[in-house]
């Protein structure tokens, strides 16, 4: 029978390697054990709990005094994810539409005012309703313009300071060695070339601080012993009558008798008087409700953001370097839009695109004349080709540029529509990011017409918004169907778009 060797009796390179590894592990364990405890621990910052709601504020008329308005809740970023703000914690009013919430109206991240929510209403669309798009929760509030900055209290000095003892040099100032005797209190002697205004005591400056010698207790005692009248002491009893100026001065130095009453004004529960109604008391008569969906030229939209924390503004807009850059990008986006319109025409209206060609003209009979024929030769002119049809005009073009993140590529959003009614009008929306060569790469393309909105909704840009408080903006679009609409957030990175959130349908 073969005997089995004990593991400890095995020798070889592998055993040596294992032994060396064991020694290294033991040494490292001893070093770690001897290290101080402070070097083994580190502080980890707590994750910020972000609560941020995003909505769309719509109004007609003037923004400061709208004819009608409403707030449509879109998204709510809470617990690290996006929720539908129209249904989140609706008990019965959604959490994002609680009365008293303050929304900041932003334009590409810059605040243009605030909206104080007064009340919310749940609209239910009926079959006989004459105003579509009225379905779901809407908020109503009062627009408050931004507070203007306080004017500065700094005022320039009326008298310019004059420094003596400096050599006159129109080019550069330097210090003069000709100063007065230290401790004499006299001014430095000016140079022979100094102007007359620099001699003597400098002009009096009302804003120039001065030092005064105060009268101490020793001086007062000395003056009292010498028979002089001591300084007026407000606490010293006197038999003479003080003038009204002294009485008012003494009263100002004493504590206010109404200080107890003034402290009551700091009570947070103290009722306050307002001009007009407070926001919490406003109703439908004070805030006209926007109903239906007005025309594009009458309806105004803006992003509304409500955050539990005050955050610094972040401007996501991208200014044009010059008008030449604007026209260059516009021409490239126009060319891409016309290509998308042609593709949509050929895919959805093949009858017009594949119309039968016109019959060709009959060929001319062969020329049987001889070369030396005396018959008058006629020149056969070729028919010139028909000119290319003019490109279809696009109307209401809008081209906006954004920088959606720090150091990110420029992002452009182009929207327009063609002329016509019904199936003849087409809406086109393009989103592109420029590459390293400055060429726009299409990330989102949408073409539809007025009769197929339920199949392909119209994409209308609202604005760029930071929905997660991450300093990275997304594009907020309205997806408008025939009688309903939704709102969607798109994140664009590397010329690729991803839909990160979509609301429910409002009818």
Image (tube, rainbow, N blue to C red):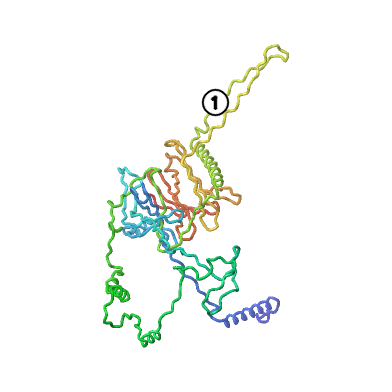
Which of 268 and 391 lies nearest the eye of the viewer? 268
Quadrant location, the N terminus: bottom right
Q: In the drawing, does residue 176 fall left or right of residue 98? A: right
The picture places residue 368, in percent across and down from the top left corner, at: 68, 15
The picture places residue 193, in percent across and down from the top left corner, at: 59, 66
**Residue linked to disc 1:** 358
Instruction: Name which residue lies at 36% across and 45% down.
Output: 293
- Residue furthest right as drawn: 372
Quadrant in the rendering for residue 386: top right
Q: Secondary structure at mark 1?
A: loop
Instruction: Name which residue lies at 60% across and 52% down.
Output: 436
Which of 7 and 358 lies nearest the eye of the viewer? 358
The picture places residue 198, in percent across and down from the top left corner, at: 54, 67
- Residue furthest bottom as drawn: 225
- Residue furthest top as drawn: 374
**Height in image: 186 above or below 74?**
below
The picture places residue 282, in percent across and down from the top left corner, at: 28, 55
**Total numbered circles:** 1
**Height in image: 475 above or below 183?**
above
Which of 219 and 75 lies nearest the eye of the viewer? 219
**Height in image: 357 above or below 430?**
above
Which of 389 and 258 lies nearest the eye of the viewer? 258
Local crowd at mark 1 within 10 Å, few (<14), some, or many (≥20)? Answer: few
Quadrant in the rendering for residue 130: top left
Q: In the drawing, does residue 198 fall left or right of residue 281? A: right
């Amino acid at each position: 029978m073969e005997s089995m060797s004990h593991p400890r009796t095995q020798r070889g390179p592998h055993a040596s390697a294992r032994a060396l590894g064991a020694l290294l592990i033991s040494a490292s364990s001893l070093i770690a054990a001897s290290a101080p405890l402070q070097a083994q621990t580190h502080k980890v910052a707590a994750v910020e709990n972000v609560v941020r709601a995003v909505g769309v504020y719509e109004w007609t008329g003037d923004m400061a005094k709208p004819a009608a308005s409403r707030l449509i809740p879109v998204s709510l970023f809470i617990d690290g994810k996006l929720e539908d703000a129209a249904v989140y914690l609706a008990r019965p009013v959604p959490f994002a539409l609680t009365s008293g919430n303050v929304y900041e109206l932003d334009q590409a991240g810059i605040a243009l005012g605030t909206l104080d929510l007064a009340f919310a209403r749940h609209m239910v669309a009926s079959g006989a309703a004459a105003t579509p798009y009225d379905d779901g929760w809407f908020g109503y509030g009062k627009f408050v313009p931004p507070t203007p900055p306080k004017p500065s209290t700094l005022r320039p000095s009326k008298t310019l300071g004059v420094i003596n003892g400096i050599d006159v040099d129109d080019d550069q100032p330097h210090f003069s060695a000709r100063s007065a005797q230290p401790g004499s209190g006299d001014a430095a002697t000016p140079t022979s070339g100094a102007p007359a205004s620099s001699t003597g005591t400098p002009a009096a400056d009302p804003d120039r601080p001065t030092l005064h010698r105060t009268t101490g207790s020793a001086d007062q005692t000395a003056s009292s012993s010498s028979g002089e009248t001591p300084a007026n002491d407000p606490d010293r009893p006197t038999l003479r009558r003080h003038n009204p100026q002294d009485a008012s001065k003494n009263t100002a130095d004493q504590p206010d008798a109404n200080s107890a009453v003034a402290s009551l004004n700091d009570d947070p529960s103290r009722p306050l008087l307002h001009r007009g109604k407070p926001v919490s008391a406003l109703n439908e008569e004070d805030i006209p409700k926007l109903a239906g969906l007005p025309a594009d030229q009458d309806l105004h939209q803006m992003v509304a953001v409500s955050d539990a924390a005050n955050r610094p503004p972040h401007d996501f807009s991208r200014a044009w370097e010059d008008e030449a850059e604007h026209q260059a990008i516009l021409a490239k986006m126009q060319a891409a839009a016309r290509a998308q319109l042609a593709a949509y025409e050929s895919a959805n209206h093949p009858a017009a695109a594949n119309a039968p060609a016109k019959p060709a003209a009959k060929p001319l009979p062969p020329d049987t004349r001889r070369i030396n024929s005396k018959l008058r030769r006629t020149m056969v002119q070729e028919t010139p080709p028909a000119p290319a049809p003019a490109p279809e005009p696009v109307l209401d073009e809008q081209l906006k540029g954004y920088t959606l993140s720090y150091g990110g590529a420029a992002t452009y959003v182009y929207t327009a529509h063609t002329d016509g009614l019904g199936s003849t009008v087409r809406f086109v929306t393009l989103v592109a990011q420029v590459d390293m060569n400055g060429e726009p790469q299409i990330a989102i393309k949408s073409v539809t017409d007025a009769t197929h909105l339920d199949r392909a909704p119209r994409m209308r840009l609202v604005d760029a918004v930071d929905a997660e408080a991450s300093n990275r903006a997304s594009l907020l679009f309205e997806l408008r169907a025939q009688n309903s609409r939704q709102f969607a957030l798109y994140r664009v990175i590397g010329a690729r778009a991803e839909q990160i959130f979509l609301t429910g349908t409002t009818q």
